[in-house]
Image: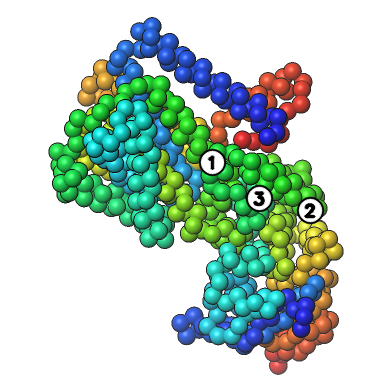
Amino acid sequence: MTNQVLSCKNVGINFGGLQAVQDFNLTIDDGELIGLIGPNGAGKTTVFNLITGVYTPTEGEILLSGINIIGKMPHQIVRYGIARTFQNIRLFDHLSVLDNLKVAANKDMRYSIFSGMFRLGGYWREESEVTDKAIEILDIFDMGKHAYKYANSLSYGEQRKLEIARAMATDPKLLLLDEPAAGMNPTETDELMDTIMLIRNEFGITTLLIEHDMRLVLGICERLMVLNYGQILAEGNPRDIVNDPLVIEAYLGKGE
Amino acid sequence: MPRDKKLIYLINTGLVLILFALLTVFEASGVFTRYSMSIVRLVCINVILATSLNVTVGNLGQITLGHAGFMSIGAYTAALFAKTEVITGQGGYYIGMILAGICAGIFGIAIGIPVLRLKGDYLAIVTLAFGEIIRVLIEYFDFTGGAQGINGIPRMQNFSVMFFVAVICVTLMYSVMTSRHGRAILAIREDEIAAQSSGINITYYKTFAFTLSAFFAGVAGAMYAHNIGTIGASFFNYNKSFDILVMVVLGGMGSFTGAVISATVLTVVPETLRQFNEYRMIVYSLLLIMVMLFRPEGLLGRKEFHITKVVDKLRNKFGKQSIEGGN
C-alpha cells in the first residue's frame, strides 16, 4: 500500500447516457510499466483523460500517492506529478526544441513577471538553471544536437521522442503514453522501446501506456490490462493475456 | 549575465541611440519639417499600439478587434488626470501615462476573463462589441465630455520623450515575451491542450497577455491624447482597431520587429501618398493586397529580426565562433 503511485477505484464516466468507462479499477505500484490495450473505441484514451483531469469522472475516485485528484484542473494535476503524451503528436511547433522543454519546466520556476520584464537576478539564475536541466534531459534522449531547431523540423520519430522528453521535463511520478508507436516503422518502434526502457532505467518513472503494437507491448510491459466497451476484460501477465480466449474474442470475434 | 547577451544588449542600445541621433539631426537641420516630425511622433504611438496588439494576436494567437477601446480608456484617463492639474508638467505626463496603462489594464482583466473563454471568430466579434461598448459609454457619460470629447489637454509633443517611451514599451513587452511567462503564452498559441498538460495555467496566462496588451494600448492612448490635445470618442471606433490589426498582420503575427516596421510603414505611406488625393486609399489598399498575396504570413512571419544573426554572419565571415541561441 505504501508505494502505490496511482489507484483508480470504480471510476466511471457517462457522456449523456453513453457509459464510456465503467467500474475501472487500477492500481499501479512504484516503478511498474503497465500496458493498456483494447479494440478501437474501448475507452483507453478516455481513461487517460480521466486520470489527467481533462474529464471529471461521474463516479469513483482517483488517488495519486494517496491524494484525491478528482476535480483538479489538468495543469494542477501536472503539478501533482502526472505527465502525458498524446495519440496525435502535440508539440509547440514554432518553438525551439529547448523551449518545448522549458515550457514544461515553467511550473517549477518562480521568478515574477516583473523580474522577467526588467531582467532581474532571478530571471538569469532560473533561466540558466532550467536551460541546463533541459539540455541534460535532451542529452539523455540523445537530442542535444537539435536543441535550437524548431520542433516541427524534426522527423516523426524524433517528434515522438521530444514529446516524451517534454513530459519528462515536468518531473513526473507517473508517465502516461498514448499510443507512442502509432505511425512508426519497425526500426522507429525499436528505438522507441529503447527510449521507454531508458526512462525506466534512468529516471525510474512509473509508466502506463496505451498501445496497439503488440510487439512493443509484449516486449516491454510487465503487466497488461485489456479494456473493452469501457470495462476491464482481463488483467495480468502479457503472455497469458494474449492467449486469453476472452481477449481474442474481443479483438477478432467469435469463431463458429 | 552571459557575455554574448551583454554584447547584444550593447549593440541594440547603440542602434537605438544612432536612430535617435539621426532623427534629432534631421529635425535640427530642417530635413524633417514640422509636419514630418508630427508623423514621426505618430509613428512612435502606432509602434506601441501595434506591438501591444501583437502580444494578443501574434503571441497568444487570439484575434481581438477591440484594441482601440483600450487605447481610448488610456487616452481619457490621461486627459482627465491632466485636467485635474494635480501634478503638472513632465511628471504629470508620466504619471498620467502609467495611470492610463493601469486603467486600461483593469478593463483588460475585467473584459478578458469572460471573453477569453471564446476563440477565433467568436472572440473577434465579442471584442469588437466590447470596443464599441466602451466608445458608446464614453459618449454617454458627462465626465468624459460626452460626444464633444475633451479639449485643451496640455500638449506634450517632445519627440525625444515619445521616442524613448516607445522604445521602453517595446523592450518591456519583448522581454516579457522572452521570459518564462512569454514562453507559456507562446505555448498556448501553439497548442492549448499540450500547454495545459505541461502544467500551464491557460486562463491565467491568457488573461495576463490580454491585460499586458491593454496596459500598453492605454499608454499609447495617453501619448495620443497629449500629442493631439483634443480627443473625441468617435476617433476610437472599430476602424482604428482594424488599422492596428492590419499593422500586426502585415508585419507578421508574432513578430515584434515586424510590427514595428509595418507600424512605421503604414503610418508614413498614407501621409506620403497625400499628393495623390483621392487615389490615396486605392494605392494603400493595393499595397496591402500585394503584401498579402506575396507574403501571406506577413513581412517577417513569426521570425524576429535579430541583431544576433547579423553579428553571427559577420563573425562567420571572419571565421570566428558563432553566438549560440536566439534572442
Dots 1, 3 in contact, CB < 8 A: no
Q: Nearer the viewer, mark 1 or mark 3?
A: 1
Dots 2, 3 in contact, CB < 8 A: no
Q: Which residue is mark 2?
A: A141
Measured as percent of width and height from the top left, residue B248 is found at 42, 38
Q: Do callouts 2 and 3 point to residues on the same chain?
A: yes
The image shows residue A79, relative to residue A243, as above or below, that is above
Q: Amino acid at mark 1?
A: Met
Q: Chain of mark 2?
A: A
Q: Residue at x 18, y 45 (%)?
A: B143
Q: Quadrant of the C terminus of chain B?
A: top right
Question: Which element type, helix, strand or loop, lies under badge 2?
Answer: loop
Most extreme residue toward the top, as rendered? B29
Asked if residue B52 lies left or right of residue A98, the reply is left
Q: Which residue is mark 3?
A: A102
The image shows residue B71, relative to residue A36, as above or below, that is above
**Residue B258 shows up from this direction:** no
Measured as percent of width and height from the top left, residue B303 is found at 55, 36
Q: Amino acid at mark 2?
A: Phe
The image shows residue B90, relative to residue B302, as above or below, that is above
Q: Residues within 10 Å of mark 2 (few under 14, many from 20)?
A: some
Q: Which residue is mark 1?
A: A117
Instruction: Say which mark, if any, is on residue A80.
Output: none
Q: Residues within 10 Å of mark 3 (few under 14, many from 20)?
A: many
Q: CA distance from mark 2 to mark 1?
A: 33 Å
